[in-house]
Amino acid sequence: MTEQINNDIKRVMAIFAHPDDPEFFAGGTLARWAAEGAQVTFVLATSGDKGSEDPQMTHTRLIEIREEEERLAAKTLGATEVIFLRQPDGELMHTLALRRELTRLIRLKKPDLVVTCDPTAYWYGNTYINHPDHRAIGDVTMAAVFPAARDRLNFIELERDEGLETHKVKYLYLAGAVEPTVYVDISDYVETKIAALREHKSQIKDMEAMAQRIRDNSLDTRSPHYAPRHIEAFRVFTLA
């Protein structure tokens, strides 16, 4: 069991596909970083405009609902800013345009640490196929972190037209990792994660079942029964 304590983290950027992804994938860890003093920014590539079974729901209305839910959830976790790129839900792809936009945001906000999805995770077990948007955002984020944000001749117009200097991200965390290397103790923040997820009322039908599932799935089975510990797992890269 390893836990990477990065005392030099002042700015965190969480880049995910949909509202509720930051909470499900890394809510406890994001809450911990915020509580420890980091400035946390969420970047959501889509606004989840396809996630409804309501026959009366429209794309426009669902965007309004889910963005507001995400703002409330982010506030619960301690995030200071939520940026919505409003790409179409279910259609996310690794394009140069999206890589450029993420590179722009990384150079603008200068995060010490970026967390996103593991793009190699096509499924979990034999009951869940990973959403293609999750894989796409992980793939494009990795390319934006390295090498695009680091090397000035990538998207040179960002420097030329906007004055955005290059930025080297120190740490990259992949959530939902196929081969995790770091386990973060979220024991003090698992209830904060659950509280944030409760804001996603349009997506979660049974809140109590969700809460119990989070507690069960995050329980570290190697911790003693008299001192249970909750964790989130990541594959971590140290880049600078």
Image (cartoon, rainbow, N blue to C red):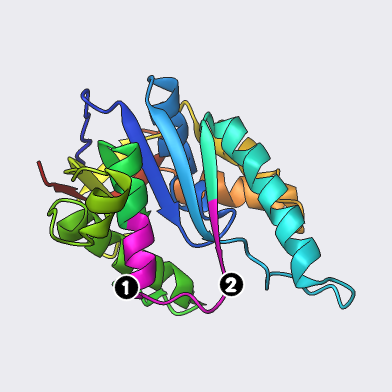
Dot 1 or dot 2: first in sequence order is 2
What residue is shown at x 32% (from left), y 73% (from top)? Answer: 96
- Identify the mark at residue 180; answer none if there is no mark: none
Q: Quadrant of the N terminus?
A: top left
Tell me: 39 left or right of 59: left
Q: Nearer the viewer, residue 128 or 117?
A: 117
Q: CA distance from mark 1 to mark 2?
A: 18 Å
- Identify the mark at residue 96; answer none if there is no mark: 1
Q: Quadrant of the C terminus?
A: top left
Amino acid type of the residue tagged 1 in the rendering: Leu
Is residue 112 visible in the rendered image? The answer is yes
Location of residue 39 with respect to 174 vertically, above or below: above
What residue is shown at x 84% (from left), y 71% (from top)? Answer: 57
The span picked out in magenta is 84-102
Categorize mark 2 by other alpha carbons within 10 Å: few (<14), some (14-19), many (20+).
some
In magenta segment, residue 31: no
